């Protein structure tokens, strides 16, 4: 959900940037890529959890169930909050990028996204 929200919110900003200043579209695509990486993190955790489940085993211990649940929730909630932050910061940064001198603003905007 976080990756989808971040991609959608940043994608709207990139689309508006493409209308206003088409030459800056490739620089404005950074938050969309960063939001897509969150989905890959979720996929990696899902693969790790699914390899920990043995379908031929006769029992599935309660501890294993809670460990898998907590790891999925930790990755999911972190991805949700990071996706929302990337979406909001990315949309604002991309939309107002043409109002400020690009060289200085883009560097600070990129550092903001990386500090999340």
Image (cartoon, rainbow, N blue to C red):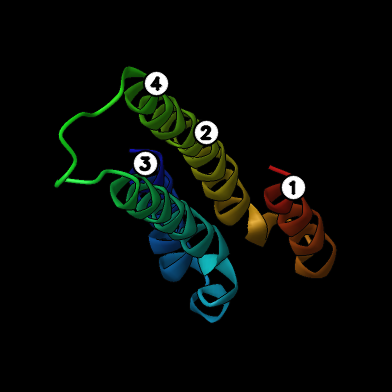
Q: Is residue 88 above or below residue 64?
A: below
What label does residue 5 carry, if any?
3
Q: Residue at x 32, y 38 (%)?
A: 1
Q: Nearer the viewer, mark 1 or mark 4?
A: 4
Coordinates of residue 105 in the picture (x, y in percent): 78, 58
Q: Secondary structure at mark 2?
A: helix
Q: CA distance from mark 3 to mark 1?
A: 18 Å
Q: Give neighbour class at mark 1: few <14, some 14-19, many 20+ (Cα, 10 Å).
A: some
Q: CA distance from mark 3 to mark 2?
A: 13 Å
Q: Is residue 73 left or right of residue 92?
A: left
| Mark 4 or mark 3: whose residue is earlier in sequence | 3
| Mark 2 or mark 1: whose residue is earlier in sequence | 2
Q: Is residue 3 left or right of residue 98?
A: left
**Residue bearing mark 4:** 63
Q: Give neighbour class at mark 4: few <14, some 14-19, many 20+ (Cα, 10 Å).
A: few
Q: Nearer the viewer, mark 4 or mark 2?
A: 4
What label does residue 78 carry, if any?
2
């Amino acid at each position: 959900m976080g990756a989808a929200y971040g991609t959608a919110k940043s994608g709207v900003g990139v689309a508006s940037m493409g209308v206003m200043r088409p030459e800056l579209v490739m620089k404005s695509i950074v938050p969309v890529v960063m939001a897509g990486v969150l989905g890959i993190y979720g996929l990696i955790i899902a693969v790790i959890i699914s390899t920990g489940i043995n379908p031929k085993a006769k029992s599935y211990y309660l501890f294993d169930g809670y460990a898998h649940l907590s790891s999925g929730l930790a990755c999911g909630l972190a991805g949700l909050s990071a996706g929302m932050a990337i979406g909001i910061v990315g949309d604002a940064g991309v939309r107002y990028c043409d109002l400020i001198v690009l060289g200085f603003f883009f560097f600070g905007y990129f550092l903001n996204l990386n500090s999340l």
